[in-house]
Amino acid sequence: MGNVILKISNLVVDYGIIRAIKGIDLEIEKGNIVAILGANGAGKSSVIRTINGLVKPKSGKIIFEDENISGLNPHKIAKKGIIQSPEGRHIFKGLTVEENLLVGAYSLKAPKGESTKKLKQQILAEVYSYFPVLKERRKQQASTLSGGEQQMLAIGRALMAKPKLLLLDEPSLGLAPMIVKDIFRIITEIKAAGNTILLVEQNAFQTLKIADEVYVMELGKIKTKGTAEELLKDEQLVEAYLGKK
């Protein structure tokens, strides 16, 4: 077993009388990309919303860095280093690109004796190295960006908080295929820099190319899990999610 940063045990989530998650287990090792695949309504986003505290679990445990964080408030979970780039991007419309990015770093504090301002500038430079287009447009109103650029901005803003675990919810949603390729390439670069990522996606084909481990959800349960390589050998799964090759 490697270095497990997040462990979910027997997680159950209800929305009123509807059981959205029916007792799932999931582990994320430090430095890995773990993906959750599944159709709409499978419960993928509910998993992320429970990890980040927006939804309280009915039962089960979420252990992050050996601490039980189940049911903690979202701001407390974010302070522990679990940061989400939300589905739907949620760009701050009245702000420039750079102002949007700096909002992501608002609670960042440098270690004692070091400058927080310097740290923010350093992370900003890193984010611009992943997304050169954001650097070019840093003085532009964020609302003038294309959909793909807004998605890059949302991921960049999450990175500004120096996450220990980055949650990406449907980053390819509604984007043109060329832009999707770009986004997935950048996600692999972010991982290569030592980041740990939980990726929730409907785009199975691109996801299986980059994930270390994949969980496939169906109707609130984990239907199957394995490495991308193992899942690509599962003919039924390939047919269900990727279409016949």
Image (cartoon, rainbow, N blue to C red):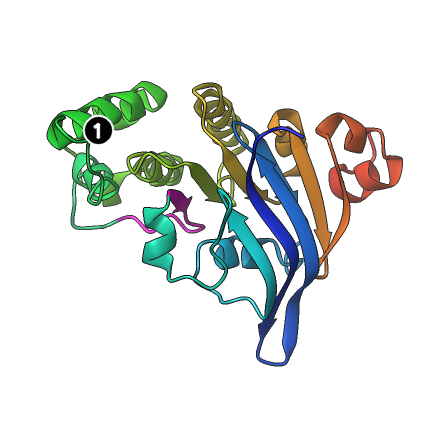
Label 1 Cα neighbours within 10 Å, binned few <14 / some 14-19 / many ≥20: some
Seen from the viewer's position, the closer of residues 49 and 143 is 49
- Is 82 covered by the magenta stretch? yes
Which residues are the magenta region?
Answer: 81-91
Seen from the viewer's position, the closer of residues 163 and 36 is 163
Is residue 11 placed above or below 154 in the rendered structure? below
Amino acid, disc 1: Arg
Q: Which residue is mark 1?
A: 137
In the displayed structure, does residue 40 sit left or right of residue 231?
left
Instruction: Assign a secondary structure to mark 1.
Output: loop
- Is 245 covered by the magenta stretch? no
Q: Position of residue 157 (x, y in %)?
A: 30, 38
Label tally: 1
Where residue 129 sits, quadrant-wise, is: top left
User: In terms of secondary structure, what is the magenta stretch mainly?
Assistant: loop
Residue drawn 12% across the image and 30% down it: 117
Is residue 229 placed above or below 43 in the rendered structure? above
Q: Position of residue 80 (x, y in %)?
A: 37, 46
Where residue 207 sits, quadrant-wise, is: top right
Seen from the viewer's position, the closer of residues 231 and 78 is 78
